[in-house]
Amino acid sequence: MKTQVAIIGAGPSGLMLGHLLRQAGLDAVIIERQTRDHVLSRIRAGVLETVTTDILEDLGIADRMRAEGLPHDGFNLADGERLIRIDLKSLVGKHVMVYGQTEPTKDLIDAAPSRGLDIVWQAEDTELHDVESDAPYITYRKDGAEHRIDARFIAGCDGYHGPSRKAVPASAGREFEKVYPFGWLGILADVPPCNHELIYANHERGFALASMRSPTRSRYYIQVPLTEKLEDWPDDRLWDELCLRLPPEAAENVARGPALEKSIAPLRSFVFEPMRHGSLFLAGDAAHIVPPTGAKGLNLAASDVRYLWRALVAWFEKNDSDAVVAYSDKALARVWKSERFSWQLTTLMHRFPADGAFDRRVQVAELDYIASSEAARRTVAENYVGLPL
Ligand code: APR
Ligand code: PHB
């Protein structure tokens, strides 16, 4: 089989890129290791910046998001009993859209057949070949048969664990990593949210986040040591701990219910440079990971995809390679700004086991500064809604 762009991974990056390329009249095919149901069972953050909502709007795949997504004009930082509201609307004139990542992923998958975007599910042993040449190809196995896809370019949208990044020789790439000494224990439950906006809470017992999926579905997280086991966190213990950490008015409003999903995720900052090697491009989690504080993961995937889509269209339509050559630097400039923001918000809002009284005083001083300075709040707001492309 032959195509113009072979995409590895049917997560948000691969799906958005595939749709944008198809809309521009280019050929693309997506190879995914998992089943559709598995991809749609993954629960991830869901705060969309304009860069992401614009892609769905431009693709004409935004009806459900417009009907069911929750536009939020602000969010809150809490410290013990103190609540600091970041009024996104008045500070930067923008909002974010709360629409759990599973939902746009489903919308993109559902729209694929009618737009001629082929997705191969359950592809095993995907391998990349000749990525330094002008004629790269992918091989994979499905139902016991070997398959080969020849392409002009390969887009590695296969997440942190996928094979694409590993296809770049060690001598041609560099990794930057920061691992945090804790994880997030998350719970999803069909109960109304405790507050109409998100609350990121710093508490002496550890960080907590109150988030939501809809007016009847809540998503909460608490910071836990990485040694914690899920079986040691029955629902009641989790609800109790959450209520201890959230500010009192929010804690009083927490409605409890059985967990639809419960999981512990480690926090990590990671960047791989460069994001292009020959005919292989990396996009989304394949190239970078942010800790979830600030919900930048999906939005960074969207900005990568936007740059990459434009570069590929210019290459195929006008034989113009400038944007292809510039892709990595351009994407990384935005990636690093989001890495900085996610790291800073993580550092500000969590309790680090190695931190002492000095570090805590610095946190309090920074929160005081944010509470008292409109300029400081504007900086937080500008980053939260997403920096310009
Ligand atoms: N062959 C084919 N597909 C693969 C392979 C492989 N060998 N390895 C991984 N994949 C698939 C995964 O199964 C997954 O569906 O690549 C996809 C990558 O999707 P994501 O991990 O969601 O990454 P991305 O699309 O870049 O999305 C970035 O979504 O996942 C969140 O936290 C992430 O918010 C961030 C955003
Ligand atoms: C979520 O709702 O899952 C969520 C929201 C905001 C974050 C992280 C996760 O910063």
Image: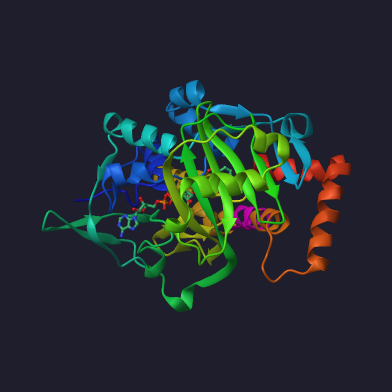
Q: Quadrant of residue 318?
A: top left
Residue at 58 percent across and 46 percent down: it is 240
> Left or right: where does residue 19 sit relative to residue 125?
right
Residue 155, position as x, y percentages in the image: 38, 54
**Residue 303 seen:** no
**Front position in the image: 137 or 335:** 335
Which residue ends up furthest to the left in the rendered image?
144
Residue 277, position as x, y percentages in the image: 44, 65
Q: Quadrant of residue 110?
A: top left
**Residue 220 seen:** yes
**Front position in the image: 77 or 72:** 77
Question: In the displayed structure, would residue 72 be above or below residue 84?
Answer: above
Question: In the displayed structure, would residue 254 be above or below residue 269?
Answer: above
Q: Is 336 contained in the magenta span?
A: yes
Q: Is 169 contained in the magenta span?
A: no
Write down the region rendered in magenta: 332-341
> Left or right: where does residue 202 sit relative to residue 226?
right
> Left or right: where does residue 357 sit relative to residue 335?
right
Quarter in which the C terminus is drawn: top right
Which residue ends up furthest to the bottom in the rendered image?
171
**Front position in the image: 68 or 78:** 78
Residue at 86 percent across and 55 percent down: it is 365
Question: In the displayed structure, would residue 111 be above or below residue 323?
Answer: above
Q: Main secondary structure of the magenta part?
A: helix
Residue 156, position as x, y percentages in the image: 39, 57
Residue 166, position as x, y percentages in the image: 39, 69
> Left or right: where does residue 59 sit relative to residue 383?
left
